[in-house]
Image (spheres, helix red, strand yellow):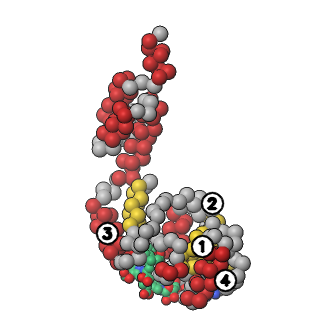
Amino acid sequence: MDLFPIFLKLTARPCLVIGAGNLAESKIESLRAANAKITVIAPQASERIADMAASGEIDWLQREYSPGDIQSCFLVVTATNIPAVNRAVFLEAQENNILCNAVDDPPFCDFYFPSVVRRGDLQIAISTAGASPALAQKLRKEINAALPLDTGDWLTDLGNLRREVVQMEPLNEERKQLLHQLATREVCGYDGCPSRVLAREHAKTNPLPSEKNETQQ
Ligand SMILES: C[C@@]1(CC(=O)O)C2=NC(=C\c3[nH]c(c(CCC(=O)O)c3CC(=O)O)Cc3[nH]c(c(CC(=O)O)c3CCC(=O)O)/C=C3\N/C(=C\2)[C@@H](CCC(=O)O)[C@]3(C)CC(=O)O)/[C@H]1CCC(=O)O
Ligand SMILES: NC(=O)c1ccc[n+]([C@@H]2O[C@H](COP(=O)([O-])OP(=O)(O)OC[C@H]3O[C@@H](n4cnc5c(N)ncnc54)[C@H](O)[C@@H]3O)[C@@H](O)[C@H]2O)c1
């Protein structure tokens, strides 16, 4: 199956979850990690979901889904224990061009949830296109065990240094080579960090056009 992998910005986007049991709970957790604005519709909710609603982290409309509910949301996840309800939600989503995931019901999904390894801004998402969720989970565990715990902190420092380089050097082959080199090295936030020193020395050999003019004058 030819699936298109993207990383969505969901901050403040209205996302709807129909059903509030165990399966809904894990989808809500992943939507919350992306700061989505979540509304749940379900007559009953798990303890965790009820707590999130009580503390104002999500909205919970304590009732059954009814047609017309999903028209103004960005995406919808349907996780009730009644397949006919999940399918009705999917059909309403299709009519309104809204992306829908009917949990564990592939023919009624526009998108699948991946297995995810996370270290700060680094996310590795694994999909088997539904062929074997168990394999996706196994690979997630293997990658998780192999990836150092401080990779997220290192990436933050690397990202900050890259921003400095982008300010100091023009977009050209030399800058690209330097950024590849830095991505293989230790980096820290310290001003005298060897990678930062290297980058500043490199910038002298590859200055921005305005700085080149200044030194020529
Ligand atoms: C990745 C993960 C993310 C998440 O759920 O957030 C995820 N399933 C996970 C675990 C898992 N799910 C199942 C098992 C039992 C072992 C097995 O079946 O292999 C295990 C493992 C376990 O729980 O031990 C059962 C299952 N899953 C689906 C069906 C229906 C079917 O196959 O027809 C059935 C049978 C239901 C039944 O018969 O009752 C369908 C889907 N599950 C997906 C995602 C989508 C495709 C992902 C992909 O492969 O790319 C897709 C298509 C739709 C969707 O729901 O988005 C999460 C791992 C999280 C992690 O730990 O990292
Ligand atoms: N939990 C699992 O591991 C698992 C695995 C595979 C498949 N499933 C299937 O997935 C479904 C959901 O699983 P679960 O464990 O989250 O179920 P659950 O019974 O814990 O939760 C079902 C939720 O759906 C809500 N609901 C029922 N009718 C509704 C309606 N008309 N409108 C809105 N909400 C409604 C309920 O109030 C409840 O919040 C079930 O069909 C289950 O058989 C579950």
Which disc is residue 139 wearing?
Answer: 3
Q: Amino acid at mark 1?
A: Val
Q: Upstream in the sequence, badge 4 or badge 3?
A: 4
Residue drawn 35% across the image and 32% down it = 174
Q: Is 125 placed above or below 101 here?
A: above
Q: Secondary structure at mark 1?
A: strand
Q: Upstream in the sequence, badge 2 or badge 1?
A: 2
Give the label, 2 or 3, closer to the camera: 3
Q: Secondary structure at mark 3?
A: helix
Q: Secondary structure at mark 2?
A: loop
| Image spot of residue 79 (x, y percent) | 55, 81
Q: CA gap, disc 4 to disc 3? A: 36 Å
Q: Which residue is mark 4?
A: 65
| Image spot of residue 55 (x, y percent) | 62, 69
Q: Is 44 placed above or below 120 here?
A: below
Tag 4 near tag 1, CB within 8 Å: no
Q: Amino acid at mark 3?
A: Leu
Q: Is 118 placed above or below 196 here?
A: below
Q: Residues within 10 Å of mark 1 (few under 14, many from 20)?
A: many
| Residue reaching furthest to the front | 2
Q: Upstream in the sequence, badge 4 or badge 2?
A: 2
The answer to whether mark 3 is within 8 Å of ligand 1 is: no
Q: Which residue is mark 1?
A: 76
Asked whether residue 112 is in view, the answer is yes
Residue drawn 37% across the image and 37% down it = 176
Q: Quadrant of residue 145?
A: bottom left
The quarter of the image that holds ligand 1 is bottom left
Q: Which residue is mark 2?
A: 12
| Image spot of residue 20 (x, y percent) | 57, 80
